[in-house]
Image: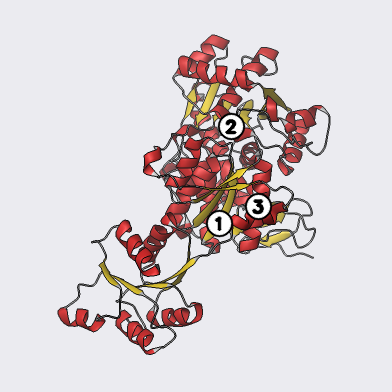
Amino acid sequence: MTVQPSFPYLECASCGYHEPLEHPPEACPQCGEGWFDVVYDYDHVARIWPDALQGRPWGMWRYRELLPLLDARHCVTMGEGGTPLLPAANLGIMMGCPHIYFKDERQGPTGSFKDRQASLSMSVMKEMGVSEAVVASTGNVAIAYSAYSSLAGIKLWAFLTSLVPPEKMREVAIYGSEVVKVTGTYDQTKEVAAEFANRQSIFRDRGIRSFAARESMKTVAFEAAEQLAGLLGAERAAEGEPPWRAPDWYVQAVSGGMGPVGVWKGYEELLDMGLVDKMPKLACIQAEGCAPMVHSFRKGLEVAEPVLNPRTRIITLATGSPGPAYIFLANVIREHGGVFEAVSDEETFRAVRVMAELDGVSMERAAGVAFAGLFKLISKGVIQRDEIVIVNCSGHTFPVEKHLLGDEWAREIQAPGEDGLLGSLEGLDRGVDRVAILEDDPNAALLLRRILQARGDYEIFEARDGRSGLEMIRREQPDVILLDLMMPEMDGFEVLEAIEADERLRSIPVVVVTAKELTSSEKNRLGDQIEMLLEKGDFTDQDLLHQVLDVLE
């Protein structure tokens, strides 16, 4: 008999195998599948939320009891979530639909609903001790992950199809991520990214198969249910009804399908806890030129038939092979109602203009797909005009000026051809400079790491005291050492003396970075053993970078 782990725990969606959240496996050891759901103590949460939520600010971490992070100290947040649920008042008047609302995810830190995913995913990575990660993206995920990885101190490799607009690529690059442009489709880009991560032994974000990414999307449902109850307060029936409200329809543009999958679980949890009284119907909208879910569902297929050559200008939705999300969503729609629908690029651009002109809402093309789908479903009579509808206005991104980055802000490789993945990845094999950081202050070490990672590809080793730092230097033989002077066990002066006494180490250049105000005798003690002395607070990241480059050369 299997003993159930303590809450929260992971449960294999295929066979029900349980695994503690502390040690998430990539695949189920019992059946080999890779989709894990997170199970929480819903009775406990239902008891505490009525009082606990009243004193908490708006934001996705308001619902932390139903998010898979064990230690709040690992939370990586920039105030994501808490986006408003707004009535599309003029659109509603025009279409005769008084209850159209949109979740304005444009207001996130990087301008899209993927900020939620980035916040939770980076928090879980930080809790797992990840220091370097790989992600494949059509734009918004890479932008959000880049911003949050910068805050988390995690080096990010962002693989994007070369079809992604240059503005989005520049925004990824501005955060210091390594941008890799792949000349090929998004599905080919994912394949290249996966092989690179495997060859370099780097943690890879697994997209829809990542429980953290899916769990983050629940918070859209949590917020919307609370907000909708407030907006419809005057129309609530007698006492005894659940305090929150689910809409009749939830509408979202889909590519890989993660958003609706997570939102559906969010409403399921609210229903289980008695906070809402029904589940919404899902409307999953795709671009006509890349609509594998729509076409597969209409054919009655259990597994999605991939689109090999996407033909749409909505590049962020050009996922030809949606994988397990289709299986999940198709089952939901068959059992609970809902629809898959496709819209043309022209219908999308028209919807973008309509929303800007009617309700003053400028949005990205992917959000325009959702609204174009809404228009089509209302005109077909699938969505009734008196039903309550929430549309995910998924994002709005802003261009980054070219002159901020210079010319060499991305690497470019070809998608796999006759030479296969190994040939495509040859240009990414890294001749990396190795840097050792000896710094007892984690925040100072993080700053040094980020300065280096944002400007180049370095393999970085860290130690928090002089004794373990010296052992690390002897073991790793770095190309340059960044050394703090005030450290436990052995201070920086003693480390320098040990380096000077070791014939194998004395040629390694040392840059001292210290907050200590040195006396004349201390400066004399350093003598010619170091390449440069940088005092914290008195140097810029350019100073540090130039000094590291100088000593490496």
- Is 458 on the left or on the right of 214, as rendered? left
- 474 shown above or below 281: below
Q: Nearer the viewer, residue 49 or 365?
A: 365
Residue at the disc numbered 1: 133
Residue at the disc numbered 2: 240
Q: In which quarter of the image is the N terminus?
A: bottom right
Residue 369 drawn at (x, y percent): 60, 25
Q: Which of marks 2 and 1 is nearer the N terminus?
A: 1
Label 3 is placed on what type of residue?
Ser
Disc 3 crowd, CA 10 A, few/some/many (<14, 14-19, 20+): some
Residue 94 in view of the camera? yes
What colour scheme does the image use? secondary structure
Residue at the disc numbered 3: 424
Q: Which mark is residue 48?
A: none
Q: Distance between the residues labelled 3 and 1?
A: 19 Å
Q: Nearer the viewer, mark 2 or mark 3?
A: 3
Q: What element carries label 1?
A: strand
**Image quarter of residue 404:** top left
Residue 136 drawn at (x, y percent): 60, 47
